Image (tube, rainbow, N blue to C red):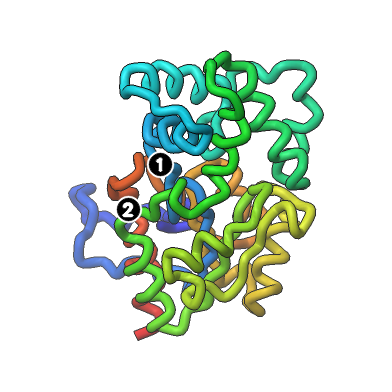
Amino acid sequence: MPDHAEPPKPRTSSGIPDATAPKPPRRPIDAVLLDFHGTLAQVEDPVAWVMAAAATCGTALDRARATALADRLVAAGRPGGPPPARVPPHLAEVWAERDLYPPAHRAAYVGLAATVNSGVDGLPEALYERVLRPEGWLPYPETAATLQALRAARVPVAVVSNIGFDLRPHFDAWGLTDLVDAFVLSYEVGRCKPDPAIFYRACGMLGVDPERTLMVGDMSADAGAVRVGCAALILPTAEAGQSNGLAAVLDLVLPHHT
């Protein structure tokens, strides 16, 4: 995907684009920055999330009750889910700082879950703990193969995420850690996307020029990488288990490494 507007295509005398004209060269890509949520992995199905968390609290929920609860909890604000339509005033401060400080991240999402009366003692904490564990997430179908292909081509990779907890245990559990050269997590570096500083930090950790780096994500915050000179590829939103088009990265990167 080009990171800038393409020049007008050459046309024949009749005004039809000339298919035989050479295409402008793509920018060489030496490294790839990858968002986590929505790019490499997705949170598990909301109903499964609620049922698994309730089970750790000693409560077995039937699917109908779990579905009703899941709908309300997702609307209230779920880690890895859409942002809540409204953040209660008493949670506004921790919500604003959730991706910079782990205690704020926990307080924000446990607090949001606590606004839903579930009737299950300890459920807000159990729901949050589920997200901290690898089994609370599912890598996208193309994730492992894409990372393996980039490693085989000796293209350095960094995971760049706005997040309030450590992702390394997840990659360890999925057998993907050795395919990632750096983890650039907002709570560790003190900056959140689209702040240019987090992209500069990622490129610096990989030892690459931003002008020869591709940022891949699914949000406008990821596209903020263009402010430091990176190219950007924004993927469509996809549910867990569905293809999100991540393999398109290889079409952009590998031709320069063969």
173 and 9: which is toward the camera? 173
**In the rendered structure, are the residues bearing label 2 and label 1 in contact, judged by CB atoms less than 8 Å apart?**
no
Residue labelled with disc 1: 44
Residue type (three-letter) at the residue carrying disc 2: Gly
Q: Identify which amino acid the numbered label 1 is placed on.
A: Glu
Q: Residue at x 57, y 49 (%)?
A: 132
User: Which residue is most to the front?
Assistant: 58
Q: Is residue 143 left or right of residue 92?
A: left
- How many numbered marks does the figure carry? 2
Question: What x and y, as percent, mark residue 129?
Answer: 58, 43
The residue lying at 51 percent from left, 23 percent from top is 73
Please tell me which residue is depicted at 51% across the width and 55% down the height of the picture. 232
Residue receiving disc 2? 245
Q: Is residue 243 above or below residue 81?
A: below
Residue 153 rendering spot, x and y as whole percentages: 40, 83
248 vs 6, left or right, is left
Q: Earlier in the sequence, mark 2 or mark 1?
A: 1
Categorize mark 1 by other alpha carbons within 10 Å: few (<14), some (14-19), many (20+).
Answer: many
Viewer can see residue 184: yes
Q: Position of residue 227 (x, y in %)?
A: 66, 53
Q: Regarding mark 2 in the picture, which secondary structure is present there?
A: loop
